[in-house]
Amino acid sequence: TSTLFAPPYSKKHYATDEMASPVNTTDRLKHLRELMASSKYNVAAYVVPSEDAHQSEYVAACDERRAFISGFDGSAGCAVITMDKASMFTDGRYFLQASKQMDANWTLMKCGTPGVPTWQEYLTNHLPAGTRVGIDPTLLAAAEGGRLSAALKSRGGGDLVAIEDNLVDIVWGSQRPARPEDKAFIQPMEYAGESHTSKIARVREQIEKEGAEGLIVAALDEVAWLFNLRGSDIDFNPVFFAYAVIAKDKATLYIDDVKLTDAVRQHLSGIVVRPYGEIFGELSLLSASLVQSKRQVLAGQTASWALVQALGAENINIAQSPITRLKALKNAVELQGMRQCHIRDGVAMANYFGWLEDQLLNQGGNLRLSEVDAADKLEEFRRAQEHCVGLSFATISSVGANGAIIHYSPKRGSDALLDVTQMYL
């Protein structure tokens, strides 16, 4: 795995065996179904995606709702709970893990195998006609929300119900981890190579070319890039929770005040800063003027169904964000930074391979060192390099058959011992 360079953001370490026994979800599902059946919500099915409100690949602990309700903590999957069944849809990377982590309350839906529908197909084709399906609209991509809503309506008058209160959060209660309050910090020009004011100006040029009124920025990496800021809200990712709206004459960053230092506030001089959750109300106020002007606001494909509902589907154009294209074309400073970090990481890897060979051949490490021991040592060598403060993802340290498990991450207590007669990945 490669390393990233910024203030600390990777907090997970190799600890106890997370796959030792399934989580008992009986009480959790019972509470959830009681909420679903209540007059306040009145839905016959409830969807729990893996993603957060920004469609992030990795999520913060407070957003690991699917893992909480099911016990399965793989990175990909979607849970669908009805009054008499709980189904987990995931792909072949996680069949083994999911079967070990989930209890008898759950049915594993092995996506990609013959006869197994996707979770969307399951909702539209396998549930009774007219079913009301509930979901937190912030966790569903806008385009997916539109397609699914239309599909349900076309089949017997079903309905995709946007439930503002996340029902899993209610079940989770006081045990749910708090939202991160880590401080955002500045990405210096020596690493960024371009000021945030210059980036915003280039984004405005793209908005004008599209004939749009503005751009909603929902992807966390795009917000971080645009404002030359970084954070540590999600493990292994230098991002922070925020939205942005770029208009012709105003740039607004929606971020909670607790995350701002005096230096960051000064850095954001000229930028309107609003609380994180206020974007929905302000988009609702904007919708009327957009109808009058007959112009739309652009939004990237990570924009949520909730953002579309706030602004109005007729007022928003969901397409590839112009920031995706701008960010992909690296400037000279970024290119040089990438080269240098790979050189440093190469030094760490060389040091590690030398240490590993000596341990296995000369120091009695064979059948004594474990996968976690080796992973921890590699991280130690990486952290010894200048600027390194964490991993970009958990080290894949695997012996023998474990090397065949996709995205394998060893856990202390269940990890295998290094063996010179077996392949080590």
Image (cartoon, grey):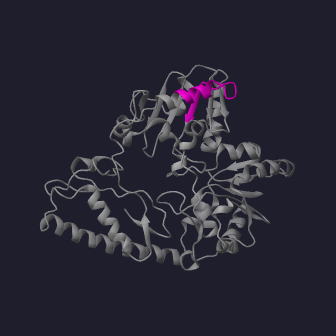
Report the label total: 0
Q: Where residue 318 appears, x then y in whole percent?
A: 66, 49
- Above or below — where is 252 with respect to 50? below
Frontmost residue, 332 versus 106: 106
Give the left or right position of residue 308, taking residue 36 as reference: right
Q: Where residue 273 appears, x then y in whole percent?
A: 73, 63
Quadrant of the rendered structure where residue 194 is? bottom right
Frontmost residue, 97 versus 232: 232
Q: Where residue 179 appears, x then y in whole percent?
A: 58, 52
Give the left or right position of residue 6, taking residue 406 as reference: right
Frontmost residue, 113 versus 221: 221
Residue range corresponding to the magenta coloring:
30-47
Q: Where residue 401 appears, x then y in whole percent?
A: 23, 47
Q: Is residue 217 visible?
A: yes
For this orientation, the residue located farthest to the front is 174
Quadrant in which the C terminus is drawn: bottom left
- Above or below — where is 422 with respect to 252? above
| Residue in the image at 53% along x and 41% along y | 65
Give the left or right position of residue 140, taking residue 251 as reference: left
